[in-house]
Amino acid sequence: MALKWKSIRTLACVLSASAALGSTALAADAPRVQLTVATDAPGPEISRHLFGQFAEHLGTGIYGGIWVGKDSKIPNTRGIRKDVVEALRAIKVPNIRWPGGCYADKYHWRDGIGPQARRPKTLNPDWGGVIEPNSFGTHEFMDLAEQVGAEAYVSINVGSGSVREMAEWLEYMTSAKPSSLAQERVRNGAAKPFKVPLLGIGNEVWGCGGSMTPEEYAAEMKKYASFAVNFHPDQQKEGQKMRRIASGPNRDDYRFTEVVMRHVKEHALYSWGIEGLSLHSYTGLDKWPPSHPATDFAESEYMAILKATLDMETFVTKHSAIMDRYDPEKKVALVVDEWGAWYAPTAGSNPSFLQQQNSQRDAILAALNINLFARHADRVRIANIAQMINVLQAMILTSDTGIVLTPSYHAFKLYVPFQDAKLLKSQHDGQPFKLADTELPRFDSVAARGRDGKVWVALTNVHPTEPLTLQLKAGTATAARGETLTAPRFDSVNTFKQPQLVAPKPITARQDAACGCLVLDLAPASLTVVSLD
Ligand code: AHR
């Protein structure tokens, strides 16, 4: 029997205690959560840029992971790995932040242009002091962005660079007019100017970017923002202008946000401005050096890491509240351009290369963060997981013979329909649970109306070992289908030997006349994304 539900205009009227619902269609022993989605009142846009990536000159994040050179046996297009590009295209990477990270404040763009053989060999002081061949520079990065279909997010050097160096780099990249710098770019192979939609003004200026106080940085930021001129003809148009993103606070450094935003407000009448303020927060750095295990961990570790990642909710809420005071119109986006898990390095790897495995827990961690960014979509409009390839919570692990897609990659793929979708209100009656002295939400979700017109719902069963029966009510929906990312265990990983251990599988909801809802069986520690009919 096809179910007909009244259009849901208020959430409260449809919620009922799950215990009161009885149905033979439900798994007898799995706890039930009822989720109600209000399908008729779209909220703010969940910017596709929340699904941004970060590629730093760090370990094998660039060299080996992306850039193998034109003469490599690894199939490549102009030196860039084909397998990696193909996989990244499938998750519709909206932007790639480059060249750092800490490396950005050591990077001098002139080292990375011109004939490969003439580029200087420099050192990478933050990441093992290794030789940096500079084979991957501005043109190669722009080629990568184009091959992937992503926008360029260029982080400029504030810490050891200069306003002039930044201004010249921007002119080199973006000028269509034949200035000497633009002609040099043409001679180096790019007849057309590059677009730079996103510009980072320094990185972690309170730390590796120059150890500045917020007051010191605010003075620098004003100068850099004033002279950050993008000459690209298309980027003069409203809606396409370059967004300047100031280096922002670490985690709970609310004073940093306060000081920078006060300067933004006080100087808003003048010609300079910023369109974004960055926030960095990693999960797992309560121990230094990082020592939480990435694999073979116990339930207590699963609980502790997911609990810690939810600190992001507090950080985003509190930084947003400060920004609201100085920028009530929300012109300046909160840009979480470094987030993700940071664990003990893979045994046998160079610890400076920040290589780690990536488990089903990390897919859940990613989902929890994406959901909360989406719920703050009015202020959080850009985010970049750290990092894209082979480093920290990577999407892809590479070797000379192939690639492995991590559980985090699959999570990002499941969320593709949420890119530029409109947030929908939803409410559930899931109760927190406790294990190993740690309390976590039992269930988490986000709903949106996609650009395809469909209602999409992402459902996370947070419990590491117990399934969950989800009762879903959403407008007049009578069917839901999509994919579910489950794993044999919460610490399961994909490896070169077993690359498909964690991979999405189709899932279809069943109708339940007794509850007047759709029912989905959610496996332990799983992420499910369905669209509704
Ligand atoms: O992502 C690794 C490093 O973490 C980045 O270079 C830096 O910005 C942060 O501290």
Image (tube, rainbow, N blue to C red):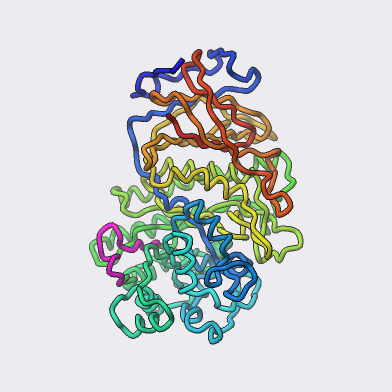
Asked whether, in this view, residue 155 is left or right of residue 409, the answer is left
Asked whether, in this view, residue 211 is left or right of residue 46, the answer is right
Q: Quadrant of residue 12?
A: top left
Q: Position of residue 525 (x, y in %)?
A: 63, 36
* Residue shown at 73% from the left, 45% from the top: 297
Instruction: Say if the magenta span includes residue 197.
Output: no
Q: Position of residue 148 (x, y in %)?
A: 48, 60
* Residue shown at 58% from the left, 60% from the top: 83
Point out the residue furthest to the right here.
Answer: 348
Q: Quadrant of residue 201?
A: bottom left
Q: Is residue 401 visible?
A: yes
Q: Is residue 196 above or below residue 392?
A: below
Instruction: Say if the magenta span includes residue 242.
Output: yes
Depth check: give the residue in front, 278 or 149: 149
Q: Is residue 137 above or below residue 270?
A: below
The magenta stretch is 231-245
Classify the position of ligand 1 by quadrant: top left, top right, bottom left or bottom right.
bottom right
Asked whether, in this view, residue 195 is left or right of residue 348, the answer is left
Q: Is residue 285 visible?
A: no
Count the marks: how many?
0
Q: Position of residue 516 (x, y in %)?
A: 46, 17
Depth check: give the residue in front, 205 or 136: 136
The C terminus: image quadrant: top left
Depth check: give the residue in front, 43 or 117: 117
Depth check: give the residue in front, 133 or 185: 185
* Residue shown at 55% from the left, 57% from the top: 386
